[in-house]
Image (tube, rainbow, N blue to C red):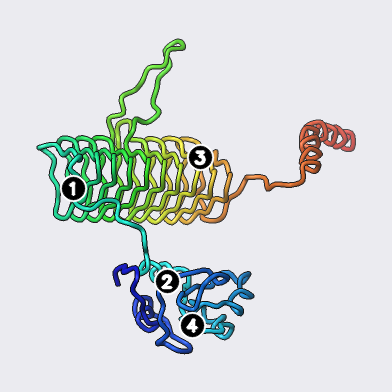
Amino acid sequence: MTANPGRSYTLAELAEQVGGTITGDATVRISGVGTLAGASASQISFLTNPKYTPQLTSTSAGAVIVPEKAAGDAPCPALVVKNPHAAFARIAQCFDTTPAVASGVAPSAVVADSATLGDNVSLGPHVVIEDGAVIGDNVSIGANTVIGKGAVIGNDCVFYPNVTIYHDVVIGQGVVIQAQTVIGADGFGYANDNGLWLPIPQTGSVRIGDNSYIGASSSIDRGAMEDTVIGDNVIIDNQVQVGHNCIIGDHSCICGSTGIAGSCHIGKYVIIGGGVGINGHISICDKVQVTGYTMIVQDITEPGVYSSGQPAMPNRDWRKNVIRLRQVDSLYQRVKALEKLRES
């Protein structure tokens, strides 16, 4: 079912898109989505976190998407599924009101004679498509975006305004890139000669797989000699830095303000929380979850959850802990001396 803002659907029609079973009136009409606390009788909401069960029991939504264990708590028709969040995401797409980034080809767009445009390409004002670039079918490119020489853009991509795609970057199908993001700028490669920084030409590129999503104001640097590689269905949040020659595996998630230094290899199905810092040349295996503000300084070879950030606490307690931390070494030395004395 394609997005059709302004149209309403019966709960039965929506259920056809996601499966599951319906309890209550399957003919109730839905024209939008909302939160459990704020939804109206014409909207559908969902429950995944048991914390919000009280909101479920009092919701004014016309219908809700719930797991089986919560079906009896709904005061309205319910769509019972295994993964309510995923079902909600698919249903919400039917009501997406996001405007198109471009419609047709703007008169001010500049397309090089040697560039190739597929069918049904839309280019916003002042878009620049440089020599040898190849743009696939059904691609929409927002205002002021630049597609560099020799870049290849797959079918069904959407680039928002002010995106910059450098030369020879290869992007797969169905990729969405939000505003101000830069793909393929030089990696941070320099050699020091007696205090003088010498730039190392970055002759690799960037390859991004199908159906990946990249947030606003993020940067993915090109490789020094080999390519930086982003796999299929990778989601990258806003203001993320991916250094040169990194490899990020399929279906991974990188949250906002994370910084990944060069030559890191991140596996598949990895989730990295916000504000994480990853040293260069680190390898992280598949199915790892890193919580926010963690610092990764060595390889992770076993799946699981990893943390190092310190949660907030009252300032007074924090100051005490800092003082005690400074005393750890002297305490260690005292214990060590006592152990030696005891042994003698």
Closest to the camera, between mark 3 and mark 1, is: 1
Position of 335 compared to 233: left or right? right
- Quadrant of the drawing holding the N terminus: bottom left
The answer for how far apart the CA atoms under marks 2 and 4 are is 15 Å
According to the image, label 4 marks what residue?
78
Marks 1 and 3: in contact by CB < 8 Å?
Answer: no
The answer for how far apart the CA atoms under marks 2 and 1 are is 31 Å
According to the image, label 1 marks what residue?
105
According to the image, label 3 marks what residue?
278
Marks 4 and 1: in contact by CB < 8 Å?
Answer: no
The quarter holding residue 143 reads top left
Callout 1: helix, strand or loop?
A: loop
The answer for how far apart the CA atoms under marks 3 and 2 are is 40 Å
Which is nearer the N-term, disc 2 or disc 4? 2
Callout 3: helix, strand or loop?
A: strand
Disc 1: CA contacts within 10 A as few (<14), some (14-19) or many (>=20):
some
Residue 32 image label:
2
The amino acid type found where label 4 is placed reads Ala
User: Please, which residue is most extreme toward the bottom here?
Assistant: 24
Position of residue 105 measured from the top left corner of the image (x, y, whole percent): 18, 48
User: Please, which residue is most extreme toward the left here?
Assistant: 113
